Structure formats: structure tokens, C-alpha cells
Amino acid sequence: MTDLTIETAGNGTAAVAAPLATWRDYLDLLKPRVMTLVVFTGAAGLVLAPTPVHPVLALAAVLAIALAAGAAGAINMWYDRDIDAVMERTRARPLVRGVVAPPDALAFGLVLTGIAVMLMGLALNWTAAALLALASAFYVFVYTLWLKRRTPQNIVIGGAAGAFPPMIGWAAATGEVSATAIALFALIFLWTPPHFWALALYRAGDYAKAGVPMLPVVAGARATRRQILAYTVAMLPVSLLPTAFGVTGTAYAAAAVVLGLLFIASAVRVCREDGPATGWRSAKLMFGYSIFHLFALFGAMVADHAGAI
Amino acid sequence: MGQAATPDRPPTGRDRSPPGAEHEGWARARRARGRNLALLAALLAFIVLIYLVTLVRLGGLD
């Protein structure tokens, strides 16, 4: 890793030494907050699967999912460092601040991806390892390199990458992909667009400045609100599939209905809101609620499956 | 023009050092030590995990 960068002034004298990256800067490259959600849903997939897994192997599987997700985030930051520098939200990232050199971030991401896939393959099984590699490749190549700067459907299609973790967790336990695993995938797939578009509504200026064609930038706030509402409505029946497949019981189903109706209600509030006048208060609330929603939904699944509710 | 403050000898590398350069060097060394220790801890934890995974896979920790 590059510890020291000396910028040479015109007269050949050493002028400025870049600050040395700390371990926290490398931790920031892994997008730890995003990783939390990925790890939680991945672990939920592992717990919900019908095959019990030894705690040590479960720990290895969760670590592999966390490492792969973080590594994909580091590669994403390496590629997007130009637009991250323009956007308010991402301006403090390590690559933008210049504390981590771009080749170091890329190498960090690639090495961690390799370690994560090998760990999953050797400790659990190669089906889960292949899914992990596929999810990483999808996030880097399909979302980051291909779709993000080209289409307002970037997070719809690219969001599939973030939907893989419960399926990977399930495959880590069972060695296969079942209908329930696909239902868990579909749940996060449908959750991702309203989650990101709620954020994009009040960060539209930032995205426009960076040239990222998010839906509010390209189609406007009105079309985005309609899409947000449509996805939250579509998500409700899908959230009941784990009960339909017999993995969870009626307690989870009741929780899913309540949570789903709250999600729809938050989307309706966003639809009715005069965003510029209110400072996008409802959109900000919806973004915050969407994170809680996913945690609560998977938490309820695990609790019901374990007989805790 | 501020000529009174100009030294009457050619500037040396030491003259061009920013104020607090010694402190900067110390802080840099401290950050490097912190990062190396974090890397060491991560590697040790990883080795322990691989060891335990091997034991489980061989049926020694059931």
C-alpha cells in the first residue's frame, strides 16, 4: 500500500506529503453501514434455511458475505471517485480526501473479494461461493461500470446485487437455491428502488451535478413518487411469501402486513408532499423508515422461525 | 518587499520544513503503527478462523 505521496513542485522540490491512511480509512472503503444491512440479511438467509450450520461455519459464511460486500464497495469507490468528489454526500470518502491512493483501493477490493469467495467455497460450499462471486461481479460490472451513469433504471437492475445476500446465506447452509431463497431475493429487489429513490428525491441536485441519471433527475419528482408507491405496493404480497412457503408462521405474516402498510403509508406521504416547500421531510422520513423496514422484516422472519414471536 | 526577513545564506532543506514537521512525522508514525497492528490483528483472527473451520470440516469440533 502506498504510505506516502510526495507531490513534486515545478522546481523539483518536494512540496506536499499526502496524509497517511489509517485503518479507519480502509474500513470506510468497505461502506460499513451498507455492509450492516447486507450482513444482517445474509445471516437471516442462513438462519431461515432448513439445514442447520455449525456456528463456526456460519461465522465464516457471514464474514465472507461481509468481506465481499465491503470489497465491492471499495471497488465502487475506486471507480466513482470522480463523481464522489462532486456530491455533497460522498465528498468525505477516503479516495476523495486523497488519504487512500486509487490503486490501493482497487487492490484492496480485489484481494478481499478473492479471500471472501475462497473462504465461502472452502468453508461452506461452492454454490454459495459462486453466488457470492456473481453478486460482486454484478455490483461492480453491471451496476457500477455499466448502468449507474447511463440509465435511470440503474438501481432497479443494479439493485439485484444487494438482493443476493439472503440467497447466498441460504445456499451456504443448504448448498442449493430454493423458491424461498428466490422470494427473499425478490423482497430486497423490490425494496431497493423506493429506498434509493426516496434519497434521490432530496439529493436530486447532487446527482444532477454529478451527471448521474437518477430517476428524479431524468423523469422528475412526480414520476419518481409514482414509482416509489408502485414498488412499496408490490413489495407487500412478496413479503408474505416466506409464510406461504412455510418458512415462517402467521406472527411474521402479521408483522409483514403492518410493516408493509407503514411503508405504503410513507410512500403516500411522499406522493402528497410538496418537496421543495417542506425540505423533502417525508422523503427523508421514508428513507430512514425503509432501512428500519428491511431490518424489521428480516428480524421478524428470524424471530418467528426461531419461535420467539 | 520583506527583504529584511530574507536570510543571508541559501535556503536549505531544513529551512523549507513546515512548522511542526517533527510532530507531523510522529503522528504519521503513530498512524502507521495503528494500521499495522490492525492488519496484524485481522490476519491473526483470520488464521484462527481458518484453523477452526478446518477442525469443523474434519469433524473435530462437533
Image: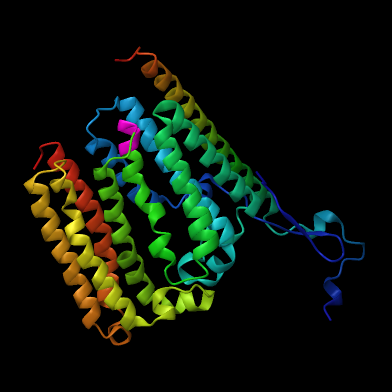
Taking the image as shown, residue A286 lies to the left or right of residue A38, namely left
The colour scheme used to paint the residues is: rainbow
Q: Does residue A94 appear in this view?
A: no
Looking at this view, name the residue that lies furthest to the front: A179
| Figure quadrant of residue A198 | bottom left
**Residue A125 at x, y percent in the picture:** 40, 29
| Figure quadrant of residue B11 | bottom right
Out of A239 and B60, give the one closest to the viewer.
Answer: A239
Magenta run includes residue A302:
no
- Give the residue at x 33% y 15%: B61
Q: Main secondary structure of the magenta part?
A: helix
Q: Can you say whether A29 is above or below A12 in the image?
A: above
**Residue B6 at x, y percent in the picture:** 86, 70
- Give the residue at x 53% y 62%: A146
Out of A223 and A35, give the one closest to the viewer.
Answer: A223
In which quadrant of the rendered image does the C terminus of chain A lie? top left
Taking the image as shown, residue B13 lies to the left or right of residue B42, namely right
Out of A11 and A200, give the one closest to the viewer.
Answer: A200
**Residue A207 at x, y percent in the picture:** 47, 74
- Give the residue at x 27% y 86%: A274
Q: Can you say whether A136 is above or below A96 in the image?
A: above
- Give the residue at x 41% y 26%: A123
Out of A95 and A271, give the one closest to the viewer.
Answer: A271
**Residue A110 at x, y percent in the picture:** 57, 44
Question: How many numbered discs sit on the rendered protein?
Answer: 0
Q: Does residue B50 appear in this view?
A: yes
Magenta residues span A170-175
